[in-house]
Amino acid sequence: MSPVPLSVLDLSPVLSGRPPSAELRASVDLARAAERAGYHRYWVAEHHNSPAVVSAPAVLVATIAAATTTLRVGAGGVMLPNHSPLQVAETFRSLEALHPGRVDLGIGRAPGTDGRTALALRGSREALVRDDFEDRLAELRGHVDGFEPGHPFAGVVAQPTDVPLPPVWLLGSSDHGARVAAALGTGYAYAGHFGTLDPVPLLRAYRAGFAPSRWRSQPHAVLAVSVVVAPTAQRAAELAHAATLATVRLRLGAAGPLPTPEEAAAHRWTLAERNAAGRLEPRPVVGTAGQVVPVLADLVDRSGADELMVLTQVHDPAERALSYELLAREWSLRAVA
């Protein structure tokens, strides 16, 4: 199999029976465990007004980077339409200054929330409907590299100016994101944990269309997948069943904390929930490490992904960390073999 690096995507899920603030500390603990297990990169996501996840990407990136030593840490990602490009450039230049060579800036275009909350974030209905993502990317770059003479923001520079902006990645779940990342010459991360398109043609199209740029000289494609690993297939299925219930509730507009496996086993599923579960795509890769790794390795080989980023939604923090540990151990063994 291709010996590509393993990385972590962390949504900081709110867990049934625990206060949301505890999950921020749990993310820091999981990052330390991921570093010990040999993971390459650790990304946190941006969401708003959700009872299912907590989100403070810049704060978590800074805290996790300070709590680790070798792990690359980043946002996966910053939803750029929710923020001033100047503020993003200043924040991530500052993070790069504090943790040189270890910070990533993943950028997305979705609001990461519902329409009313997006309106609260963006301040006006005009801003809410404006399709200016690529203009915002150009502005972000301008605050670092400089604007053309006559630009309204000429001379407005993101401090500190003596450090570069961290590597930029575009996130996406459609072919549009892959095309934009290729044309702009950035890294590309496909959100395979919820995107329903086949990642194989998407990543191939990104590579084929990649144009070297100031951002990056060579293409780099990250494939994110949802995975649950346990010492036994039965336990993995029980853990995944709880994650499925949480996802179904989210899809039906009733998002809430991640239930325990016992709560999920006792839950009386409604017809709507059963139908939603039957239509659920993509499905997580579930099983023992020995069962999961060949499936993931095949996906990497077919897609040509340069990196595999794993999202694991498990209620017990210890079982969640164990899932990542078992996967990393088997992945390393298979790569050596």
Image: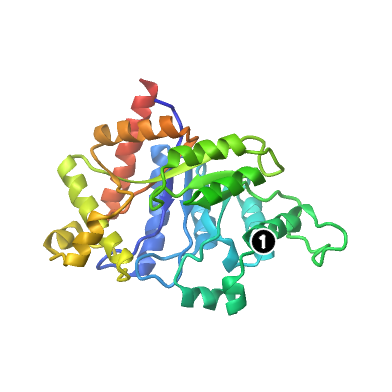
* Left or right: where 294 falls relative to 68: left
What residue is pinned by disc 1? Answer: 136
* 20 shown above or below 221: below
- Secondary structure of the residue carrying tag 1 is helix
Where residue 39 appears, as percent x and y from the top left, is 43, 40
Q: Toward which corner of the image does residue 62 lie, by quadrant? A: bottom right
Where residue 307 appears, as percent x and y from the top left, is 47, 37
Image point (48%, 51%), residue name? 174
In which quadrant of the rendered image does the N terminus lie? top left
Image point (21%, 66%), residue name? 272
Q: Toward which corner of the image does residue 126 lie, by quadrant? A: bottom right
* 206 shown above or below 13: above
In which quadrant of the rendered image does the C terminus lie? top left
Image point (38%, 68%), residue name? 21
Where residue 139 appears, as percent x and y from the top left, is 71, 60
Amino acid of disc 1: Arg
Residue that protrudes farthest toward the top in the picture:
337
Q: Toward which corner of the image does residue 216 lie, by quadrant? A: top right
Image point (70%, 48%), residue name? 164
Neighbours of disc 1 within 10 Å: few (<14), some (14-19), many (20+): some
